[in-house]
Image (cartoon, coloured by chain):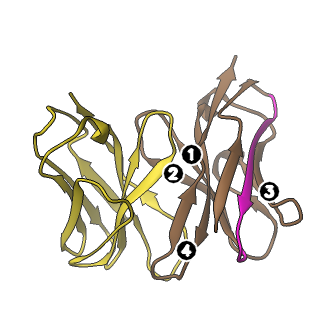
Amino acid sequence: SQTIHQWPATLVQPVGSPLSLECTVEGTSNPNLYWYRQAAGRGLQLLFYSVGIGQISSEVPQNLSASRPQDRQFILSSKKLLLSDSGFYLCAWSVRDVWRGARFFGPGTRLTVL
Amino acid sequence: AQSVTQLGSHVSVSEGALVLLRCNYSSSVPPYLFWYVQYPNQGLQLLLKYTTGATLVKGINGFEAEFKKSETSFHLTKPSAHMSDAAEYFCAVSYGSYNTDKLIFGTGTRLQVFP
């Protein structure tokens, strides 16, 4: 069966520090991968998605970046965090060409920027 | 453009009562519609989906939703609420190609269940 892992589960970082969040998927090949952010009191905002290794599409201009160095690994990064980067970050995957719109989410990382 | 509106950011029901969470969509093409549930400090879980065919869709945990094209609605219901149903529920609409489909989420409805 497929599983998705995210780490760390929680993170407290000072403003201006770097960020690296990691997501890995097991049990499937060639998935579409996504990073979402959920801010307090808001819905989910799509940040990045990837249809293959090295292929990243950005949905919202910001100081975050994403990379996909391996088929089932997706990394969210920042060189300098802002207060507004606080939120709950969710990684998700989907099966290409099947179940359009269905997403399988990881457990999330709660990021607090102080 | 595709969009989703969830009416009511908070809904409270008594245990055993009917649950009704409202969702209206806007789509220029036949929509694919979804309901997701999020328990506290967890990721989202797919409850049910409508793609084509039968307009009454059954999902997990006793939930179901009915696609009504004339009303552009996809409301989520459950006949009898359980305490374990307390969570946040998100309606979503999908558009785009199979390879790069986009999923637009509503702002969510938090369901509280009282004993």
> Looking at the rendering, in which quadrant would you find the N terminus of chain B?
bottom right
Query: Mark 4 highlights which residue?
Result: A100
Q: Is residue B72 left or right of residue A4?
A: right
As shown in the figure, which amino acid type bears the numbered disc 2?
Answer: Gln
**Same subunit: marks 2 and 4:** no
User: Residue A58, percent across and down?
Assistant: 33, 67
Instruction: Determine if the magenta segment contains residue A23.
Output: no
Q: Amino acid at mark 3?
A: Ser
Disc 2 marks which residue? B45
In this rendering, the count of numbered labels is 4
Alpha carbon separation for disc pair 2 and 3: 21 Å
Secondary structure, mark 3, is strand
Q: Report, in whole angstroms, how far the alpha carbon at label 2 lies from the one at label 4.
A: 15 Å
Residue at the (51%, 45%) spot, across then down: A43
Check chain identity for marks 1 and 3: say if they share one: yes
Looking at the rendered image, the quarter that the C terminus of chain B falls into is top right
State the yellow chain. Answer: A
What x and y, as percent, mark residue A6? 26, 50
Few, some or many residues within 10 Å of mark 1 (<14, 14–19, 20+): many
Answer whether labels 1 and 3 touch (C-beta < 8 Å).
Answer: no
Q: In this image, A55 relative to B78: left or right?
A: left
To the question of a shared chain for discs 4 and 3, the answer is no
Is disc 2 placed on a helix, strand or loop?
strand
Q: Write down the chain letter for disc 2.
A: B
Please tell me in which quadrant of the rendered image residue B55 appears.
bottom right
Where disc 1 sits, the SS reads: strand
Cα distance, mark 2 to mark 1? 5 Å
What's drawn in magenta, residue-wise? B17-30
The alpha-carbon separation of the residues under discs 4 and 1 comes to 18 Å
Rendering colour (chain B):
brown
Badge 4 and badge 1 both on one subunit: no
Please report, as a chain letter, where disc 1 is located: B
